[in-house]
Image (cartoon, rainbow, N blue to C red):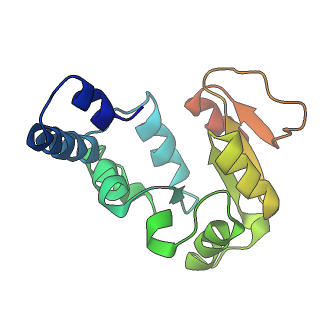
Amino acid sequence: MSYRSTLSQLDIQTDQINNLSQSFWHIFNHFAVMESDVNEVLTVLTRNYRLVVITNGFISAQLPRMQAAVIEHFFQAVVVSEAIGFAKPSPEIFHHALSRLNLTLAQVLYVGHSLKHDYAGATQVKIDFCYYNRKNQNLPQEAKPNFMMSKLLNLLELFN
């Protein structure tokens, strides 16, 4: 059930729903809650590596959220599915990101938190994959990421 249908059932008027929707979207797009160690990890990695974001979503949401988190300066490129017409796990979004930075498959480690989108896409194009398993969930038997971590700071251990 969508929030619109929920609000309608509560007899909240359409103009109020639209105002609420616009307010929510504005807050969502301009607010970010950062996980601990993000800045440290990104600071260390950008010393020797070029970083790219590959995200499913909308340009109007992803870029302002990165700016709100003050992390956009760490990334050489941001590839947003809306902008290129392909979403993860489609191989095209990964190939687009590789071509933006003129990288080969062997030069890339893709870090992601979704087996459905990140792992599936990275493995389709044969990019090494590190699964950010922050909830320490058991993996399906068929999932075999190259690396796995439960804390973001552990990513730095892969590069020492």
x and y percentages locating residue 42 in the rendered image: 48, 46
Viewer can see residue 85: yes
101 shown above or below 8: below
Q: How many marks?
A: 0
Q: Residue at x 60, y 74 (%)?
A: 96
- In the picture, the quarter occupied by the C terminus is top right
Residue at the far right in the pictured view? 141
x and y percentages locating residue 60 in the rendered image: 30, 60
Residue 7's image quarter?
A: top left
From the viewer's perspective, tell me whether residue 141 is left or right of residue 155: right
Viewer can see residue 76: no
x and y percentages locating residue 135 in the rendered image: 62, 21
Q: Foreground: 90 or 40?
A: 90
Q: Foreground: 16 or 64?
A: 16
From the viewer's perspective, tell me whether residue 72 is left or right of residue 156: left
Q: Residue at x 74, y 73 (%)?
A: 104
Q: Residue at x 25, y 40 (%)?
A: 31
Q: Residue at x 64, y 38 (%)?
A: 155
x and y percentages locating residue 141 in the rendered image: 90, 31
Q: Foreground: 160 or 135?
A: 135
60 shown above or below 120: below
Residue 153's image quarter?
A: top right
- In the picture, the quarter occupied by the N terminus is top left
